[in-house]
Amino acid sequence: MTWRPTVVAMVTRIALTGLASVASVVSLTLAGPGGRAPAPLEWGAGPLTVAALPRITYVAHRGGAREVPENSMTGLAAAYERGTAQVLDFDTRVLRDGTPVVFHDETLNRTTYLGGEVRALNAREWQGVRLRPKDRLPGSWRSERPPTVAEVLDRFGGRIVLMLEAKDPRGLNRLAELIRARGLTRSVFVNSNDPEVARRVHRLGLLSQLWRSAQQLRTDRPERWRSYVDLLDVDHRSRDADLVRAVNSGIARVWAHTVVTDAQRDRVLALGCDGVITDTPGRLARAAQRGARP
């Protein structure tokens, strides 16, 4: 489908009040030897790939949405620097002119100072969008423009494994071009809730991720997807039997979303999942450290 330009008046501006021009970010690092945070996985001789991931992997969902402004460049950078997750997750949508951007919702209303549909804007108009950080986030955060996918790939690609959800499958070919051009086909998971989109991702030579809700997993047969799904992303609220069935499906990686407590994490790991997708990577990491033996 071709999207025709939409009158900019569809986007309702909301007055900007009380924005801080400079922000201090509270660090939530996990202290390592000598009291320093562990360095994040880093690009060495070549781009870091999924082969470097540990046996149990932690994913900062939207950068860690209860600790940083979701899907923001500053939030992703903070999650990267803290070193409490080995994968950075973010959402993608497509603007009117085909530009892939980092954003979760169909509309701007919930997380920005504007209103209207994301797909109504072009790349030039996107420059005027500003995120509205949640008041309950720890620390103080500045308002900033949501990044484009190209900007995130350029900043983090190959330095840490990335996970992006293709919210709008019409942008899949463009996403593939961006990933291939940077040599990141083994460094970026491309996520969808649709098995057919996951199959398309696989055919494009990318790492395919498929997420499923607890309700979907009740009737799913995950073994059917093992030929083209590299990562099965399951709802932690699923029944024990459904999680075990997913773990035994033959799909190489089974990670659980969206975990926020120690008990949720411990349950999915005990059932065989080998990854945790979390809004609170810093808190879970600190809790794990407190529980570790000297």
Image (tube, grey):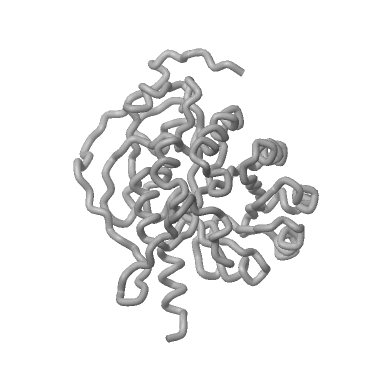
Position of the N terminus, as image quadrant, is top right
- Number of numbered markers: 0
Q: Is residue 129 left or right of residue 95?
A: left
Residue 12, picture quadrant: top left
Q: Is residue 66 above or below residue 167?
A: below
Q: Is residue 119 above or below residue 268?
A: above
At 67% from the left edge and 67% from the top edge, which residue is drawn? 272
Which residue appears farthest toward the bottom when viewing the image?
A: 294
Pinpoint residue 292: horizontal percent, then vertical percent.
Answer: 46, 80
At 57% from the left edge and 37% from the top edge, which residue is drawn? 166
Which residue appears farthest toward the front when viewing the image?
A: 45
Q: Is residue 45 left or right of residue 206?
A: left
Pinpoint residue 233: horizontal percent, then vertical percent.
Answer: 63, 53
Q: Is residue 14 above or below residue 143?
A: above
Q: Is residue 39 left or right of residue 164?
A: left
At 36% from the left edge and 44% from the top edge, which residue is drawn? 73
Pinpoint residue 36: horizontal percent, then vertical percent.
Answer: 31, 70
Q: Name the residue nearer the viewer: 257 or 263.
A: 257
Residue 258, picture quadrant: bottom right
Position of the C terminus, as image quadrant, is bottom left
